[in-house]
Image (tube, coloured by chain):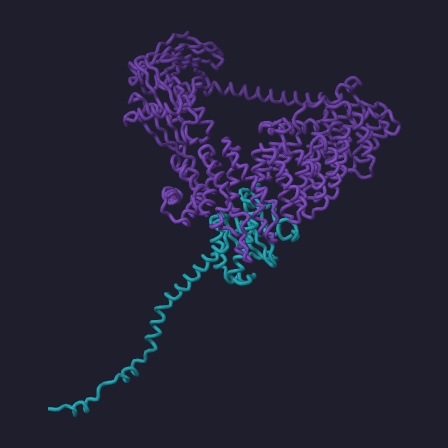
């Protein structure tokens, strides 16, 4: 249906005779069609005509056109750049001018007062949104006018409302918020930014919940701008207050977001403290996110790591259930990496563990830290080794198997740290509940640790149970989690996140995200695999290794035994059909590559390495004997077929008639392209193996495209040349279904392998590919241009090749079409 | 873009649902149910915007709603719409309904579903806001009503013709035909 209407509706839209109402509908309809089929919008001159709809008189048309242009801009920002100045001029028209046709008194001329302060809020909102897709205009005139407009809007907001009705101010405020977000977006006018911030500050204590919500949301963005960051901080009190007193969860959530955004070194401690206080009473739905945010802030702005440790332990104490693994992994990483806090951390967790009820996550952190650094506090009689051990063990029975496993590791580490409690620990390890635990992991750990402690000398023990080496510092893994969680947040939010990072001076590219994800995995492996004795690991490894070896031998033996069978079988039915089909498949691939395996069976492997320069080429053919017997009477021969007679010359170097068992010989073929040719030269390989003659009929991967020389050119000269080659005989076109997936990267590789220069950014449709190259022959040079248009819906390609020599384009199209 | 407009009462009974993106029947019901659960548990004095709702759009999805007496008006939109703008649109919609039905109530939505849809069609088309001026909308609706009435007149014309024919009472009319008194006329003839 989109195709059917694709031509008529744009006509209706820009025609001068169409009625306004119809135009408006046409714009909306076109937008709808555009959303279903992106190609529907005609390019070229239509672009400017669509943009000029912004100049229309009828408000409805302009509003609708605005929506349409916004959608178009999202797809193709450069093409519609012209709309910026038009939109600005539309915005800056004297407001009063609009009044006669002020189509928007939202509630009509109520009580006889025409509602005039914002003539067309819908339009203004749309225009402001549209402008947010572009950086601030470069032209100082346009920019000045835009700033003037924004200024007017901010001024208007200051005026007392003419009507008490909430609905009236809604429209006005809608414009105001859009204006502020465009100010934030352009991020270049400190004056406006601060004014916007003050305006939002007023809204923060407004009686309307909606306004408070939006003010908090917008302020989050504002906080990321360096000009207004200080201004935002002035409202810290109000925001914290909002956090405490607000009745609406979603508003509180925004308050948390804002606190997170406005936090910096100077106010971090205060904000984190407030957030911790609030966490105790926080709504369940936002706790997890808050925990993450607190953890990140604490880490990011910690000047003193003892504070950080305190915060995280508090976090675990208050909202243990919501502390994800990443958070406590992170605290451990930091403690391990920083010597100065290790003693303090050990002391704090020890104290925290003394609470009668403590969260399992606390036990985990406690177990880990005491296991590593318990010795640092062992001097104190209140936290003597035995006391530490008793304390941890008192929690043992209440924990899940995962934590128990971790605790067992702590115990074995204790054996190393404090030899005096060795027997006590061994008793625990020996106890039935561990040694015969139903959980395999626990059982394994208990028995391994027990034997480790009994058998090995203290030296070995000390080496095995050494302190963990510092973790490699990378981006905090928690941040990645937060990002993942905030997937549900709006795009705005993501943008804000990016800006926060930009401000912090460590703009994290997307790659880093995956890195951290990987790191997450590795740390989890580190921490849970903890210190399973390495010796043991080696043992199992070598065990399985042996097993594999044995199997390998078994298979290998069987293979070679059976191999000879199949070989003889093959031998009798000389080139078996199966093998040749495999060969043809391979030969196809060689159109787009120069090196690789051409043919392989049980006896022989034939590889190709080739290079080409201008009209000359050199192909190395490698014959590898895969068997344990020599190949006799080995004689490969290359011959040009009838089709290539006189068009290609090949010179073949002779090879030794014997290939020893397991050996490889190389044969060089020099070739020259005299003129364009079709087909491939033949390669016949004959030899005797185990007294059975064998003959392989193959082809030499030498196609015309090998003599391509990639040619770079700009769009202009490409199109000029394309037009020059317009004779129908010079063009070859093929339309065909694709056989595999249509991946841009794969297509590019193929085109590059085909030998042509890929010209990017020339075709107006980015989906299409254009290439250019020259074929060198002895007699002449043939210029070739290519255009490949994938159609993803239909899974079809259209390939058009134009070449300066008539016969060549057809040959090339034939060759390339087979590749997709 | 507006993805859906839902109106339901305090008990979650849908009174009007209009989807501007295709969802199958079952999913539509689920969306209504989910939206009701999200919206109904909120106090009246909290804000009118709500993020969440898993069924439409995912992350890029907001609910903007308003509660009037027994009815919830919920607009499901993506991030390209201004929150306050949509809130205003709801107001326009409701006020228009009020004008057209004179003190609109839930029953009006039930018995005049067609009219409600007409009004909505004037307001929003294909998920895009079409017209926000109330007087304009009301004029159009009035025009439509007039047209409807005229057409009702046209449609009734054949029926009127039939009934007119039926009521004619032919025998009586034949009797009523006055013929000139022939004998007297003859008498008057003078030869």
The residue nearer to you, when weighing B9 against A47, is A47
Rendering coords of residue A149 (x, y %): 54, 40
Quadrant position of residue A261: top right
Residue at (72, 25) in percent of width and height: A532
Counting the numbered discs, the total is 0
Give the vertical position of A486 relative to A662 (above or below): below
Quadrant position of residue A553: top right
Q: Which chain is purple?
A: A
Residue at (72, 36) in percent of width and height: A271
The residue nearer to you, when weighing A751 against A68, is A68
Chain B's colour?
Answer: cyan
Give the vertical position of A270 relative to A342 (above or below): below
Give the vertical position of A771 relative to A3 (above or below): above
The residue nearer to you, when weighing A307 against A61, is A61
Asked if residue B33 lies left or right of residue A618, the reply is right
The residue nearer to you, when weighing B167 against A336, is B167
Looking at the figure, which quarter contains the N terminus of chain A?
A: top left
Instruction: Spot the residue most to the left.
Output: B191
Rendering coords of residue A88 (x, y %): 49, 38
Instruction: Spot the residue most to the right.
Output: A381
Can see residue A654? yes
Rendering coords of residue A7 (x, y %): 36, 42
Rendering coords of residue A738 (x, y %): 41, 32
Can see residue A4? no
Looking at the figure, which quarter contains the C terminus of chain A?
A: top left
């Amino acid at each position: 249906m989109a195709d059917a209407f694709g031509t008529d509706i744009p006509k209706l839209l820009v025609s001068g005779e169409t009625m306004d109402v119809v135009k408006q509908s046409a714009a909306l309809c076109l937008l709808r069609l555009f959303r279903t089929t992106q190609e529907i919008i005609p390019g070229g001159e239509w672009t400017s005509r669509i943009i000029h709809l912004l100049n229309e008189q009828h408000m409805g048309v302009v509003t609708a056109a605005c929506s349409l242009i916004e959608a178009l801009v999202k797809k193709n920002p450069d093409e519609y750049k012209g709309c910026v100045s038009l939109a600005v001029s539309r915005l800056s028209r004297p407001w009063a001018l609009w009044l006669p046709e002020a189509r928007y008194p939202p509630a009509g001329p109520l009580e006889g007062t025409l509602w005039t302060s914002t003539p067309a809020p819908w339009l203004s909102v749309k225009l402001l949104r549209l402008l947010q897709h572009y950086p601030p205009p470069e032209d100082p005139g346009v920019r000045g006018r835009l700033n003037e407009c924004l200024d007017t809007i901010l001024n208007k907001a200051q005026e007392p409302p003419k009507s008490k009705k909430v609905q009236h101010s809604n429209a006005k405020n809608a414009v105001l918020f859009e204006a502020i977000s465009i100010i934030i977006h352009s991020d270049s006018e400190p004056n406006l930014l601060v004014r916007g911030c003050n305006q939002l500050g007023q809204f923060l204590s407004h009686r309307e919940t909606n306004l408070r919500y939006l003010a908090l949301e917008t302020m989050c963005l504002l906080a990321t701008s360096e000009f207004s960051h200080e201004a935002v901080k002035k409202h810290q009190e109000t925001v914290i207050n909002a956090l405490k007193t607000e009745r609406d969860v979603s508003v509180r959530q925004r308050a948390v977001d804002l606190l997170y955004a406005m936090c910096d070194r100077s106010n971090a401690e205060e904000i984190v403290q407030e957030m911790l206080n609030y966490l105790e009473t926080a709504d369940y739905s936002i706790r997890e996110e808050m925990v993450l945010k607190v953890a990140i802030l604490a880490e990011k702005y910690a000047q003193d790591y003892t504070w950080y440790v305190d915060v995280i332990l508090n976090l675990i104490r208050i909202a243990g259930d919501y502390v994800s693994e990443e958070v406590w992994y992170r605290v451990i990483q930091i403690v391990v990496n920083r010597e100065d806090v290790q003693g303090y951390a050990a002391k704090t967790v020890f104290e925290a563990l003394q609470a009668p009820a403590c969260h399992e996550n606390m036990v985990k952190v406690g177990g880990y830290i005491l296991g590593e650094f318990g010795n640092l506090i062992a001097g104190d009689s209140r936290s003597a080794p035995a006391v530490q051990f008793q304390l941890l063990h008192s929690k043992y029975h209440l924990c899940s198997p995962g934590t128990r496993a971790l605790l067992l590791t702590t115990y074995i580490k204790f054996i190393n740290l404090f030899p005096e409690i060795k027997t006590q620990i061994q008793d625990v390890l020996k106890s039935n509940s561990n040694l015969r635990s139903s959980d395999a992991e626990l059982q394994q750990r208990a028995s391994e640790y027990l034997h480790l402690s009994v058998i090995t000398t203290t030296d070995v023990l000390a080496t095995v149970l050494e302190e963990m080496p510092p973790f490699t510092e990378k981006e905090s893994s928690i941040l990645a989690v937060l990002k993942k969680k905030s997937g549900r947040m709006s795009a705005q939010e993501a943008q804000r996140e990016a800006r926060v990072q930009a401000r912090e001076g460590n703009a994290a590219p997307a790659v880093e995200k995956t890195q951290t994800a990987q790191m997450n995995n590795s740390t989890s492996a580190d921490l849970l695999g903890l210190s399973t004795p390495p010796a043991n690991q080696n043992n199992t490894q070598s065990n399985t290794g042996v097993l594999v070896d044995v199997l390998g031998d078994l298979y290998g033996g069987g293979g070679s035994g059976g191999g000879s069978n199949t070989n003889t079988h093959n031998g009798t039915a000389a080139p078996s059909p199966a093998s040749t089909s495999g060969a043809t498949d391979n030969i196809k691939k060689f159109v787009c590559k120069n090196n690789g395996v051409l043919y392989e069976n049980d006896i022989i492997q034939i590889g190709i390495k080739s290079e080409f320069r201008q009209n000359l080429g050199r192909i190395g053919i490698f014959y590898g004997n895969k068997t344990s017997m020599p190949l006799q009477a080995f004689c490969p021969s290359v011959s040009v077929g009838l089709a290539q007679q006189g068009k290609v010359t090949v010179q073949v170097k002779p090879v030794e008639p014997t290939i020893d068992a397991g050996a490889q010989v190389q044969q060089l073929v020099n070739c020259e392209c005299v003129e364009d040719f079709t087909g491939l030269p033949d390669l016949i390989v004959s030899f005797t193996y185990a007294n059975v003659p064998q003959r392989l009929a193959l082809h030499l991967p030498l196609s015309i495209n090998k003599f391509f020389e990639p040619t770079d050119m700009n769009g202009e000269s490409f199109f000029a040349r394309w037009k020059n080659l317009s004779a129908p005989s010079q063009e070859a076109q093929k339309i065909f279904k694709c056989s595999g997936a249509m991946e841009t990267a794969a297509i590019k590789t193929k085109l590059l392998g085909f030998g042509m220069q890929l010209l990017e950014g020339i075709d107006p449709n980015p989906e299409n590919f254009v290439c250019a190259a020259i074929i060198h022959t002895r007699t002449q040079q043939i210029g070739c241009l290519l255009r490949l248009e994938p159609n993803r819906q239909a899974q079809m390609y259209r390939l058009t090749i134009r070449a300066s020599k008539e016969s060549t384009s057809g040959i090339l199209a034939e060759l390339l079409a087979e590749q997709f | 873009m507006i993805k859906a407009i839902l109106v339901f009462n305090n008990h979650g009974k849908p009174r009007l649902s209009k989807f501007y993106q295709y969802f199958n029947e079952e999913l539509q019901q689920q969306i209504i149910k989910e939206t009701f659960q999200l919206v109904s548990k909120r106090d009246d004095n909290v804000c009118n915007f709500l993020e969440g709702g898993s069924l439409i759009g995912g992350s890029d999805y907001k609910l903007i709603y308003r509660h009037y007496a027994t009815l919830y008006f919920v607009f499901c939109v993506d991030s390209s719409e201004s929150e306050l703008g949509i809130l205003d649109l709801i107001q326009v919609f409701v006020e228009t309904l009020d004008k057209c039905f004179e003190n609109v109530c839930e029953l009006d939505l039930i018995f005049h579903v067609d009219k409600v849809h007409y009004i909505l069609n004037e307001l929003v088309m294909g998920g895009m806001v079409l017209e926000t001026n109330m007087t304009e909308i009301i004029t159009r609706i009035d025009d439509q009503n007039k047209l409807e009435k005229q057409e009702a007149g046209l449609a009734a014309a054949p029926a009127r013709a039939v009934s007119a024919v039926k009521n004619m009472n032919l025998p009586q009319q034949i009797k009523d035909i006055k013929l000139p008194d022939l004998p007297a006329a003859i008498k008057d003839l003078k030869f």
